Image (spheres, rainbow, N blue to C red):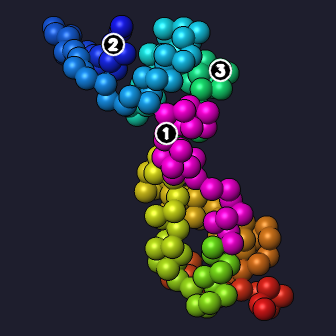
C-alpha cells in the first residue's frame, strides 16, 4: 500500500482454496498518482475503482456507489473510469474509445456512406461502424446499436429507406435528403 502497488486479485472459485495474485510492481504509475492525489477516497471506492480499471465486473450497488461519486461512466455492466480520472491517468484516448461518440456522429457516417455509395448493404454499414463503436460493447451489442441507428434514420427521422428485403437490405437516401 505504501508503495502504491495495485490491489491484489483474489480467485475464490474453488471453495477449498483462495488464490491471490499480488503485483510486484506498479501497473499504471499514473493511476497510482491519481490515488495519491485523491487521498480522500475511501478504501472501498479505491477497491472498486481498481476493479473497473482492470475491467473486472462489479455489482449494481457498487456501480451506484461509484456513479454517485462521479468516478465512473457507462451503462452497467460496461463501465469505465470517468473523464476526470482518465485525464489524470493519461487514459484520455481509451476513455473516448470506451465511451463512444454521440448518436448523431454515427448517423452522419451512415448518411455520408449513402451519399457517396448508394445503395448501401448492411455489410457496408457494419464495416464502417463496427470499428468505431465503443470497445466495451460486445459484437452483438454493436450490431444492435447499428440496428437502432438504422431504425431511427429510417422510421423516426425519415432520411433513409430499405429498398431491398429484410434479409438483404439495400439502404438509400430519400429524395428530400439527396444533395
Q: Quadrant of the N terminus?
A: top left
Q: Position of residue 83 (x, y in %)?
A: 61, 37
Q: Position of residue 20 (x, y in %)?
A: 22, 15
Q: Which residues are magenta?
A: 82-108
Looking at the rendered structure, the secondary structure element under dot 3 is: loop
Residue at which label 1 appears: 90
- Which residue sits at x=43%, y=57%? 139
Q: Is residue 102 left or right of residue 52?
A: right
Mark found first going from the N terminus, 3 or 1: 3
* Nearer to us in this view, 149 or 127: 127
Which residue occupies the extreme right position in the image?
176
Specify few, some or many for label 3: CA neighbours under 10 Å numbering under 14, 14-19, or 20 or more: few
Disc number for residue 129 = none
Q: Quadrant of the C terminus?
A: bottom right
Can residue 15 be seen in the rendering of this structure? yes
Q: CA distance from mark 2 to mark 3?
A: 25 Å
Disc number for residue 69 = 3
- Disc 3 + disc 1, Cβ < 8 Å: no
Mark found first going from the N terminus, 2 or 1: 2
Instruction: Select label 2 or label 3 by which is in front.
Output: 2
Disc number for residue 3 = 2
Q: CA distance from mark 2 to mark 1?
A: 20 Å
Looking at the rendered structure, the secondary structure element under dot 2 is: loop
Amino acid at each position: 500500500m505504501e508503495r502504491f502497488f495495485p490491489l491484489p486479485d483474489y480467485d475464490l472459485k474453488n471453495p477449498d482454496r483462495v488464490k491471490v495474485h499480488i503485483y510486484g510492481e506498479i501497473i499504471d504509475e499514473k493511476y497510482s498518482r491519481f490515488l495519491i492525489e485523491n487521498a480522500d477516497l475511501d478504501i472501498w471506492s479505491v477497491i472498486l475503482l481498481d476493479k473497473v480499471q482492470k475491467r473486472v465486473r462489479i455489482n449494481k450497488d457498487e456501480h451506484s456507489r461509484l456513479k454517485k461519486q462521479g468516478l465512473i461512466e457507462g451503462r452497467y455492466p460496461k463501465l469505465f473510469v470517468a473523464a476526470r480520472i482518465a485525464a489524470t491517468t493519461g487514459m484520455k484516448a481509451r476513455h473516448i474509445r470506451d465511451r463512444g461518440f454521440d448518436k448523431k456522429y454515427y448517423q452522419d457516417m451512415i448518411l455520408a456512406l449513402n451519399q457517396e455509395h448508394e445503395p448501401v448493404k448492411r455489410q457496408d454499414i457494419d464495416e464502417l461502424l463496427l470499428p468505431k463503436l465503443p470497445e466495451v460493447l460486445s459484437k452483438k451489442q454493436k450490431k444492435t446499436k447499428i440496428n437502432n441507428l438504422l431504425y431511427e434514420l429510417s422510421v423516426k427521422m425519415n432520411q433513409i429507406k430499405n429498398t431491398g428485403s429484410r434479409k438483404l437490405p439495400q439502404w438509400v437516401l430519400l429524395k428530400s435528403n439527396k444533395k
